[in-house]
Amino acid sequence: MVKAVSEYLKGAAEVPHNRTLLFVGAQSPEDGQGQVAGDIGAQAACVWDKVAGALAQKNLEPRHIVSVDIDLVDRADIAVAVKEQERRFRHHVAQTVRITGLADERWRLQVAVVAAVTR
């Protein structure tokens, strides 16, 4: 479906012209009751569950993801955040990780994705 543009551009993905793109805005680690788990592992699992749910609403799966943006408040959390992502899917995607402040001080990360599919 999507391929790396070249060996030297591992962070780039090409989406052919006959694909529909779905943009999933940044998902927070807040559950439906406004609760936020304390540790990065639980927050990462919550965020990826929400991403999967947003994709499922349009009959897509994590295998359709072509781009991931992860915002973290602490660079020490990168390994845990990426481990949860790899648990969900392992194919090549264009990816950006930013260390930044987030809207709620309880949040350790948020994730936005772009998915592509033939319709």
Image (tube, helix red, strand yellow):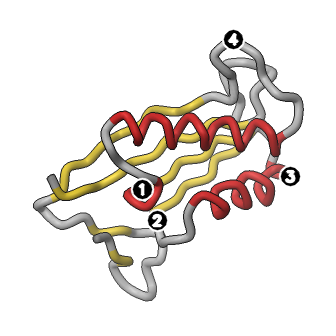
SS category of the residue bearing label 4: loop
Residue count near mark 3 (Cα–Cα under 10 Å), binned few <14, some 14–19, many ≥20: few
Residue count near mark 1 (Cα–Cα under 10 Å), binned few <14, some 14–19, many ≥20: many
The residue where tag 3 is placed is 76
> Do residues under tags 1 and 2 come within 8 Å of each other at their CB atoms?
yes
- Kind of residue indicated by mark 2: Val
Q: CA distance from mark 1 to mark 3?
A: 25 Å
Q: Residue furthest bottom?
A: 7
| Residue 84 percent location from the top left of the image | 70, 55
Q: Quadrant of the N terminus?
A: bottom left
- Kind of residue indicated by mark 3: Ala
Say if 70 sits above or below 28 in the image: below
Residue occupying the point 44% across, 35% down: 54
Specify which label sits upstream in the sequence, 1 or 2: 1
The residue where tag 4 is placed is 33
The residue where tag 1 is placed is 65
Q: CA distance from mark 3 to mark 4?
A: 28 Å
